[in-house]
Image (cartoon, helix red, strand yellow):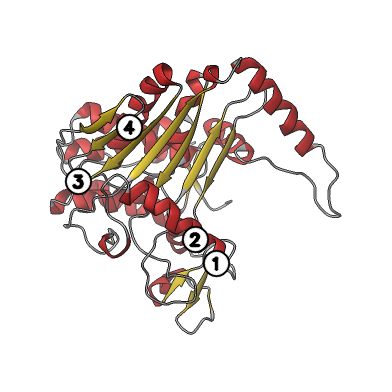
Amino acid sequence: MSSSIHIPFGALQSFIEAAFISQGIPKKDAHLIAQLMAEADLQGSDGHGVIRLPQYIKRIRAGGINKNPKIRVVQERAAMAVLDGDNGMGHLVVSQAVDLAIQKASETGVAWVSTRWSNHAGPASLYSRRPLQHNMLGLYFAVGNANHLPPWGGTDMLLSTNPISAGIPTLDEPPVVLDMATTVAAYGKVKAKAKRGEMMPPGWMIDRQGQPLLDPNKAGDGFLLPIGEHKGYGLALVVGLLAGTLGGAAMGRDVIDFNADHVSVTNTGQAILVIDLSAFGDPEHFKLQVDALVRDLRNSEKLPGVERIWVPGEQSHEKRGRYQRDGIPLAPALVADLHALAVELGIASLHHDELA
């Protein structure tokens, strides 16, 4: 990380916002998308932050994304809804889905909102965290935007990384936030490794002969491995059925590889489940119990050589504070790409006087 260039959060957000505005995205929408993308980098989810900006811009310019979507509810009951994203930016569609789920959960105790005709929306934890501000917890599911996973024992890539995330509120401890792909590594991490000029560790990918694949620039020669072998394959399938098939979104062979195809509509599916803590009792009591469990886990006996036991979300929480103070580290190659993009779009680059 010592060779990284550190960018203040505000400068990064403003740059992303300017890029989208230059392509005709309304200012209000561009501001929200930029905020979420910069927050992805702020928490260390560097495979889903500004690294995705050139790709998003390509899709917008190619007509693969609707710049002025009419996001609307197409199915609804008291505790559920399905949103049609009208092929808008996924950040906009999922944000609206989460807001609707929070509103419904405040009335019904629990609410599920699915999306169809959405797009890539960044890291799952951005959305599972949002209900925490309302004394609620969130569970988020999504279909990945390219198939990189075959069925266990096969070679046809019919499934994606299909992430799942959970946001659990606490009182004094950092919130418990799980954000995981159903593969050993998300494909965004492969892209980030390639941008930094790093090799992948064994266990992320294998080639079509079943041998370890370590060069991220040759990722197209193989596929990602599921977590827990056949169990991860099963989990990827179930998450895809919940996030995609249930809401009428793409799954399996219908998933469009948005890394290679900038024109076709992806019909990406996501789903958010929100639970109001007050429907089950006193929210403060629940959060106190979570705090106590977190401390028990952290302070439990460690194996030899282990310095600290981490709880899901703690490391991202630590990065948020450190990057807010010191700037967000970006690989020099990525900064160079962003400079080239700025020249192409006719917007101001991330100048050195903006660097932390």
Residue 352 in the image, given as x and y percentages of width and height? 41, 40
Asked if marks 4 and 1 touch (Cβ < 8 Å), the reply is no
C-alpha span from label 2 to label 1: 6 Å
Amino acid type assigned to the residue bearing label 2 in the image: Gly
Q: Which residue is mark 4?
A: 97
Q: Earlier in the sequence, mark 2 or mark 4?
A: 4
Q: Is residue 320 visible?
A: yes
Task: Report the mark closest to the observer, 2 or 4.
Answer: 2
Q: Residues within 10 Å of mark 3 (few under 14, many from 20)?
A: some
Q: Which mark is residue 234?
A: 2
Residue closest to the eye, 198 or 315: 315
Q: Earlier in the sequence, mark 3 or mark 4?
A: 4
In the image, what residue occupies the spot 61% across and 14% down?
282
Q: Which residue is mark 1?
A: 230
**SS under mark 3:** helix
**SS under mark 4:** helix
